[in-house]
Image (spheres, rainbow, N blue to C red):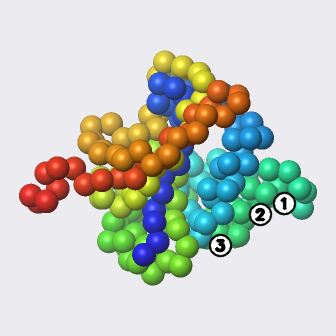
Amino acid sequence: MAKLTFSALASLDGFVADESGNFDWAAPDEEVHAFVNDLERGVGTYLYGRRMYEVMAYWETADSEGSGVHADYARIWQSADKVVYSRSLQEPSTASTRIERTFDPDVVRALKDDATADLSVGGPELAASAFAAGLVDECHLFLAPVVVGGGSPALPRGQRLDLELLDERRFRGGTVHLHYRTQSPPDAELR
C-alpha cells in the first residue's frame, strides 16, 4: 500500500501563511528546494484543496527544460496526477488533474490501496480532514526561521496527533526539517 504524506513549509510558530495570507517568507533556498525535490520524486498523486491547487498550478507552466532545482521540481510536479477537492472549481487548469466535489476518506483509502506510488496531501484544511480520518502516514515539516504571529496553521487545530520522530535535518539557512510517522492515539483501539 502506498503512503499518504503531508508536507508543509511553515513559520517557527506553525503557520503556512501569515494573517495577510502572505507566505513569501517560506520560499525555500536552493538547498531546501533540492531536499524537497528528492522527497517529492516518489509522489504519484497530489491531493489538493482548491486554494493550494491554485498556488501549485504555477508549476504546470514553469520551465521544466532547465537544470536547476525549479526546473527539476516542475518536471516532478507535471508528471504526477492531481486530485482537487472543490465545490466551486469547474475545470482544472492543469493536465493529469481531476476534480472531486467532496473529500471521501473511503475513496482516498481505496486510492492508497491501488496506488503504485505514494500520495501527498497539500493544504492545511484538506490535510486536517485526512489526519482526522487517519489517512496520513507521514508528515514532513519545514520550519523557517521566522515567527509570523498568526495566520493559517500548518497542522490541524483541535485534533490530537501522536507522532514518532523519524528524522531531522538543519539547513545552512536556518530551516529545520522534521520527519514524523503518525501513530494511532491511545484511545483509537477503543473505537
Which numbered marker is on residue 83?
none
The answer to which image quadrant residue 23 occupies is top right
**Of the pair 2 and 49, the residue shown nearer to us:** 2
| Callout 1 touching callout 2 (CB < 8 Å) | yes
Residue for point 54% across, 20% down: 148
* Residue type marked 1: Ser
The residues tagged by marks 3 and 1 sit, at their Cα atoms, a distance apart of 16 Å
Residue for point 67% across, 56% down: 38
Q: Residues within 10 Å of mark 1 (few under 14, many from 20)?
A: some
Provide residue 130's location: percent of width, then percent of height. Answer: 37, 56
- The residue pinned by badge 3 equals 96
* Residue type marked 2: Arg
Residue situated furthest bottom in the rendering:
114
- The residue pinned by badge 1 equals 64
Circle nearer the N terminus (2, 3): 2
Q: Which element is circle 1 on?
A: loop
- The residue pinned by badge 2 equals 75
Up the image or down, 26 lies above or below 118; here it is above
Q: Is residue 22 visible?
A: no
Up the image or down, 14 lies above or below 47; here it is above
Position of the C terminus, as image quadrant, is bottom left
* Residue type marked 3: Ser
The answer to whether 1 appears left or right of 70 in the picture is left
Q: Is residue 182 visible?
A: yes
Provide residue 24's location: percent of width, then percent of height. Answer: 68, 31
